Image (cartoon, grey):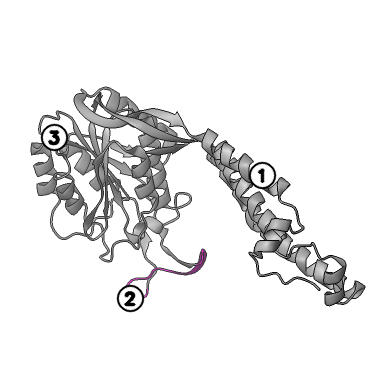
Amino acid sequence: MIQLDEKVYLYLLGILPVLVVLFVLLQIWKKRTQKQFADLSLLKRLTPDRSMFKGTLKLLFFMLGLAFLTLGLVNPKMGTKLETVKREGVDIVFAVDVSKSMLAEDIAPNRLEKAKRLVSEIINQLASDRIGIIAYAGQAYPQLPITTDYGAAKMFLQSMNTDMLTSQGTAISDAIELATTYYDDEDQTNRVLFIISDGEDHSEESINDAVEQAAENGIRIFTIGVGMTKGSPIPIKRNGIVESLKKDAQGEVVITKLNEEILMQIANEGNGEYINGSNTEEAVEYIKEQLLQMDKKEFEAKQFAEYKDQFQWFLGAGLLFLLLDIFVLDKKTKWLRRLNLFNEKEIE
């Protein structure tokens, strides 16, 4: 496993294409200037030792040297020792609503982005808990199975959008039923499901059976509401610009509202609590306190425990290429001239 210490230095690699452009422009300028000075064949006779390809070779060496020095500054580390560690935590599943109503902008920047930020901030507060992610709209879809890899969880979380599921609606019951299949540890005493939604449930079947089944499996359901109860239209955008507002079959603008009542009902029947997600800091702090009060289950997890610096190899390679750039001259060398590696014709 590779770990990068100082990723910010990777921006230095952006200098490389700039150097190529400058080199090309310089060569064009040189040729134009030389044509004004003398005929090309005459210039070759005046400078018989000038190599046509050494300049490009020197640029290549310089760019490789700069690239390797940059990677040395980034300081890649390689995991060399995998060991099993004991951890204590709770199994947590986040079910995130990705229906079109989550595009409403009654809470900045919109409900879905607010939901993703809430989940991300909750993950930041976790230590050794296992987490999983579910996306749901008209149906539920497994996004990430139970894992301790918080980095992967955030990556999957950020990729979630309202176009990932074709069937629209808000089938909370499907999300709860899918969540019951996530918990793979029968001895885990604390299983937690967070439903992050505006609460607009358009599924025909009742959610009571799903909540009851989850409770029988020892799952506590917490609901987090995003949005405003006064409601908001759903913007339809293209390239970030609002083109129109979503309308119903009668041509009326759809107003979507935060349904706190159904979210409270789910939380109460699921032995959890309803949390208003308007204030991210307060909501995350409250959830952190709730999780700290729960009993932790000990489990085993494998992780890299020892990382070794690899920057010295990149610095060494970088210095080597820079030295080659310094010692390689623009003019032809005698032995290279005899070998004629670049098919450069001798000037008689």
Q: Which amino acid does label 3 sit on?
A: Asp
Is 12 drawn above or below residue 336 in the view shown?
above
Is 19 drawn above or below residue 195 in the view shown?
below
Closer to us: 92 or 195: 92
Q: Residues within 10 Å of mark 1 (few under 14, many from 20)?
A: many
Q: Which of marks 1 and 2 is in front?
A: 1
Q: How crowded is mark 2: few (under 14 residues within 10 Å), some or many (20 or more)?
A: few
- For this view, does 264 lie left or right of residue 256? left
Mark 1 → mark 2, Cα distance in angstroms: 71 Å
- For this view, does 249 lie left or right of residue 326? left
**Residue 315 pos. (x, y %):** 58, 37
Does dot 1 land on a helix, a strand or a loop?
helix
| Magenta region includes residue 57 | no
Mark 3 → mark 2, Cα distance in angstroms: 49 Å
| Residue 97 in view in this figure | yes
Closer to us: 275 or 74: 74
Label 1, on which residue?
Answer: 322
| Residue 8 in view in this figure | no
- For this view, does 265 lie left or right of residue 315? left
Screen quadrant of the N terminus: top left
Q: Give the range drawn in magenta.
A: 239-251
Mark 1 → mark 3, Cα distance in angstroms: 56 Å
**Residue 229 pos. (x, y %):** 37, 49
Q: What residue type is labelled 1?
A: Leu
Q: What residue type is labelled 2?
A: Gln
Label 2, on which residue?
Answer: 250
Label 3, on which residue?
Answer: 185
Does dot 3 land on a helix, a strand or a loop?
loop
Residue drawn 81% across the image and 73% down it: 348
Q: Which of marks 3 and 2 is in front?
A: 3
> Residue 86 occupies which quadrant of the picture?
top left
